[in-house]
Amino acid sequence: MLAGRGVAQPGSALEWGSRGRRFKSSRPDQLQSSDIILSARPPDSSDSSPSNVQPAHLIDILLEDAIDDFLLSKRAENLSDDSISFYEGMLGRIERLVGNTALANVTSADIRQILSYVRHESVRWGGTSVSSRRPAKPITVDAYWRTLSAFFTWAEREALVAPSPMRAIPRPKVPKLAMTIFTPEDIQRLLSLCPANTYLGLRNAAIVRFLLDTGARLEEVTTIQVHDIDLKRGTVKLWGKGSKERLVRMGYRCQRSIRRYLAVRDSARPELFLTAQMEPLQPQGLRYMIRRLATRAGISGVRSSPHTFRHTFAVYYLRSGGDVKTLQMLLGHDDIRMTLRYLTAVEHEDALRAHERHSPVDRLRL
């Protein structure tokens, strides 16, 4: 149910919406005083699936207003700020493309045109960013499909559309790329660029070791507070997606690196990782720091990002004898299928090493 919308009065054609907006009923002559228009409940039926919602129970709402209420619902679900910003950016671009039309007017054909635009236009959204001035990758097209799917699933549940136009749109195929991780040599080169006699050098070394030793997500690292760290037990409290708390362990070398950093961190701020100006390190700042270090270290052939440390942690953990179930807990995955990707990566690496030992051409000296 959307905030602020009340009970329809008999014969009333309009209901007040959130922020004072007014929504026109599709069939005002059929409204009853007991109808709560946005209860997202279909008419009485033995089949209460969303596909049975009848147009008489829909409300006319503009796409822009529907997007606002969708974002509001996601905030109520306690999604992270980054997730909200992701949805807001994607849906905002889609709205600029199709115009602020009535939500119910958006058809499956419109969705296909949106996805085709993203897939085939070499300059998109006015070319205001570097990524919009080059062909979209399949994963980008898939991101728009997932955004639209989440949005229209919500709209169908809220009885704003019936049925969702996404029902006729299959998910785009995304090539499965081999997972790339940092090598031990890569990590050594990164750490060699973190001098132990400077604040930023100690901070950067602590971050590199922390990312590699915990597999923490970018947002989890930048939201850690000093009191989340327990150096006596060697643990740290992380706040994952949906504000889910989990406790992970740090190895002794990582703990030592954190101690050295804290010894020179001259600030009473609660955030653990701070800039040179003693301000909280933001996600974009951490991305830039890793990318700059990797460029200086001459690292190539792997995406230099905080998330690559997460992949590297998972693969090394399994390679060292860790099991998938505990890895799932450490990574904070709800679905073990996400964790199994790393097992596949390890098995693929094993296959490559086995071929190195058993190459038919090498063994036959051909």
Image: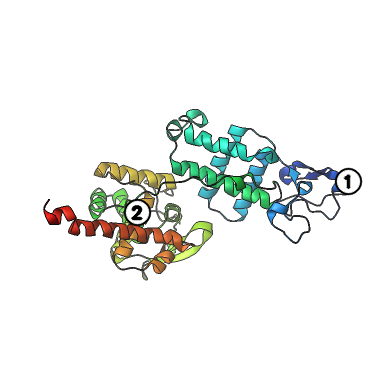
Q: Tag 2's secondary structure?
A: helix
**Residue 240 appears left or right of 4:** left
**Residue 247 appears left or right of 7:** left
Residue 341 is tagged as none
Q: How are the colours assigned in the image?
A: rainbow
Identify the residue shown where x is 51% and y is 62%: 244
Amino acid identity at mark 1: Gly
**Residue highlighted by disc 2:** 309
Q: Position of residue 220 (x, y in %)?
A: 44, 56
Eyeballing the image, is 120 above or below 34? above
Q: Compare residues 336 and 206 and report the one nearer the observer.
A: 336
Amino acid identity at mark 2: Phe
Q: Position of residue 46 (x, y in %)?
A: 75, 62
Asked which quadrant contains residue 340, the reply is bottom left
Eyeballing the image, is 339 above or below 134? below
**Residue 17 appears left or right of 28:** left
Q: Dot 2: within a 10 Å radius of its alpha carbon, few (fewer than 14), some, or many (20 or more) residues?
A: many
Q: Position of residue 167 (x, y in %)?
A: 61, 48
**Residue highlighted by disc 1:** 11
**Residue 46 appears left or right of 12:** left
Asked whether the residues under the numbered discs 1 and 2 touch, taking CB atoms below 8 Å apart as contact, a structural biologist would say: no
